Image (tube, rainbow, N blue to C red):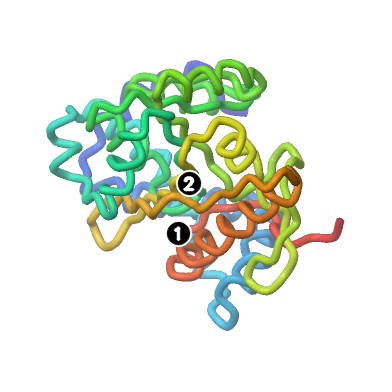
Amino acid sequence: MVSTAAIHAAERVLPQVPSALVAPVAQIMGTLAYAASPRARRAVRANLDVIAPGRASASLVRHIFAEQTRNYLEIFRLLRTDAATLRATIEKRGWEHLTTAHALGKGIIVASAHLGPISVVGQVLVAEGYPTVLPVETEHSEVQRAVNRARAAMGLQLVRADTPLAVVRALRDGKVLGLLADRAVTGVGERVTFFGGEALIPSVHIALGLRTGAPVIPAFSLRIGNALIASFEPPLELRSTGDRHADVRAGVEQWARVLETYVGRYPEQWTVFEPVWSAR
């Protein structure tokens, strides 16, 4: 168990870590986490067997643990970076999809995943002046509390995930709602084909889009070499036919195809530590 004092000390120190040290520190800490987490190791290996058949190896699994550690380190290190520097540092791809959707005045649902440096999409939205709301689960550890403090410090507006009215209100106010939609941690989702097998994929972003009319834009954070990239895709084509369940399922299937493309292209950056393909 990490003590509260240690977490607060890390919050003070991590923003001062030079960029050149982030990768080696993440490698050391990620390797320690890899060694201490046999269940997560097995889950990562099982997921890799599906998304990158023939490439799964102990070294790639360790790399994914290091990637996750680096992502957390950079949440703290980059939170004190000013907006102008962030705009110059982060490469935006498909940004026109976001600006066009925002002009509709219905708010925007940005659906993302545990891919790459996860916070980059949120950071660039805030840096570009878009009020961005992030639902968060109940905090069960000091680490979760520290991460949420860092998210709030970078300008994200945090709301509890179990307060749906606050989420709907944010969209009605024209804000951006950010959701991670590759793990159905609450068990709410649709079982659809994902990399050729059946997987439970979250559906809340699709249901919200259908209910409010807010465009649902897939967006992903990527690390290519030393470059940080926020990649935005065109809005999903959601349709209301009167059959709510069929409409939600069709939307989740669309989302799964986009998610599949990115995860398949960057499997070494997908930091999911639970088995995605499992029995009912």
Q: Residue at x 63, y 18 (%)?
A: 163
Q: Residue at x 56, y 38 (%)?
A: 209
Of residues 205 and 135, the one nearer the viewer is 205
Query: Which is more N-terminal, label 1 or label 2?
Result: 2
Q: Residue at x 53, y 50 (%)?
A: 32
Disc 1 crowd rating (10 Å Cα; few below 14, some 14-19, many 20+) is: many
Where's the N terminus, which quadrant?
Answer: top right
Say which quarter of the image contains residue 103.
Answer: top left
Q: Position of residue 115 (x, y in %)?
A: 46, 53
Q: Is residue 279 above or below residue 135?
A: below
Residue position for label 1: 269
User: Please, what secondary structure does the residue beneath circle 1 have?
Assistant: helix
Q: Locate residue 94 relative to residue 189 in the image: left or right.
A: left
Where's the C terminus, which quadrant?
Answer: bottom right
Q: Residue at x 50, y 61 (%)?
A: 258
Q: Is residue 162 above or below residue 98?
A: above
Task: Say what amino acid the circle numbered 2 marks.
Answer: Ser
Q: Position of residue 240 (x, y in %)?
A: 63, 45
